[in-house]
Image (cartoon, rainbow, N blue to C red):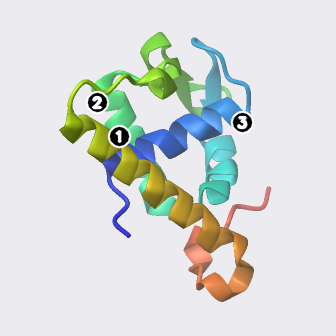
Amino acid sequence: MKVNALSKRLALHDVFEALAVQPGGALAYFDLLRRWSDTGLRRGDLDEALANAIGVGDVIETYGDEGRLAVLTEQGSELREINPATLREIEELRQATVALEWARQRTRRGARSGRRADDKPPVH
C-alpha cells in the first residue's frame, strides 16, 4: 500500500486533532514525534508531512522555549472538511485514507510489524 503525501497530511492532522489543538495552537516537535507513532507511519514521514503542511499553509513552523513548534493554521484545521469536486480528487482521498488505515493496522500488530528502532516513539 502506497502512503502518499495526502496520507501523511491526514495523519498529521489526526495528531493535532487527538491533542485537541485549535487553530493558532502550537505543538512542540517532540510532542508531535511522540504521538506520530500512533499513526503507523515512519518517523521520516513526519518530517515529510510537516514540510508538505508548511508548504500548503496547514502549519506554520516557529521556534519557542520548547524548541521547534508547529502552529496549526485555520486552513490546516479544516483539512478533514475537504470537499473533493472531481472523481480524481475523490479517488486520491480514498487511496490516502485506505493507506493511512493500513499503516495504523500494521502498528496494532505490535513488534511483529517490523517497526524499525528509529521509528519507535521517543522516551522523554
Mark 1: secondary structure: helix
Looking at the rendering, which quadrant does residue 44 occupy?
A: bottom left
Disc with the residue nearer the chain's start (3 vs 2) = 3
Is residue 39 toward the left or the right of residue 81 in the image? right
Front: mark 1 or 3: 3
Residue 61: where, in percent of width, then height?
45, 27
User: What amino acid does circle 3 point to?
Assistant: Ala
Q: Nearer the viewer, mark 3 or mark 2?
A: 3
Query: Residue 51, labelled with which disc?
Result: 1
Give x and y (percent) for residue 108.
Answer: 71, 70
Looking at marks 1 and 3 on the same chain, the residue that comes earlier in the sequence is marked by 3
- Looking at the rendered structure, the kind of residue marked 1 is Ala
- Residue 104 appears in the figure: yes
**Looking at the image, which residue is at 60% across and 73% down?**
106
Q: Which residue is denoted by mark 3 in the rendering?
A: 18
Q: Which residue is mark 2?
A: 55
Query: Is 53 in front, or is 101?
Result: 101
Picture coordinates of residue 35, whole percent (x, y): 68, 49
> Alpha carbon of mark 1 to alpha carbon of mark 3: how far?
20 Å
Quadrant occupied by the N terminus: bottom left
